[in-house]
Image (cartoon, rainbow, N blue to C red):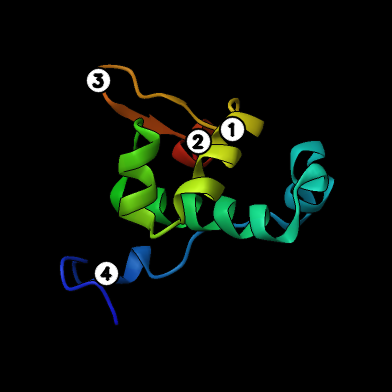
Amino acid sequence: MPRLDFPKIPPSFAWFPLIVADWLGSSAVQRMTMAERGIYLTLLMYQWQWGDLPASVANRREACGIDPRSSRRFATKFPKLFTRVPGKPGRIWNLKLATT
């Protein structure tokens, strides 16, 4: 069932940039399982729509619909993919996507 709290997406946010060469050439992505790649893409899409992500693994998991075990494992295995958002305590983002 679709989330009712998702806002209507403005046309400019109906897509998000995925630089294929960067994705395929990323050593972090190459080390990921297919499930981890799905989690990463989900987190990136959530950030694209909302601007950033909850820093708490539990809140991030709940917001993105990721199961608890997979979410904790992903956060532990790939801690450098997301960094704290300056001036916004409790929020993180993927800096590359944020500056795109």
- Which residue matches tag 4? 9
Q: CA distance from mark 1 to mark 3?
A: 18 Å
Q: Is residue 36 left or right of residue 88?
A: right
Element under disc 3: loop
CA gap between label 4 and label 2 equals 20 Å
Q: Secondary structure at mark 1?
A: loop
Residue 85 horizontal/vertical position (percent): 35, 24
The nearer-to-camera label among 1 and 4 is 1
Q: Earlier in the sequence, mark 2 or mark 3?
A: 3
Q: Which residue type does callout 3 highlight?
A: Pro
| Label pair 1/2, CB-CB below 8 angstroms | yes
Q: Does any portion of residue 78 appear in the rendered image? A: no
Q: Amino acid at mark 1?
A: Leu
Residue that label 2 marks: 94
Residue behind mark 1: 81
Residue bearing the label numbered 3: 89
Residue 71 in the figure: left or right of residue 81: left
Label 4 sits on what residue type? Answer: Ile
Q: CA distance from mark 4 to mark 3?
A: 25 Å
The reply to whether residue 74 is visible in this rendering is yes
| Distance of label 2 from label 3 (alpha carbons) | 15 Å
**Sequence order check: which comes first, mark 4 or mark 2?**
4
Q: Secondary structure at mark 2?
A: loop
Give the distance between the C-alpha atoms of the residues marked 1 and 2, in whole angstroms.
Answer: 6 Å
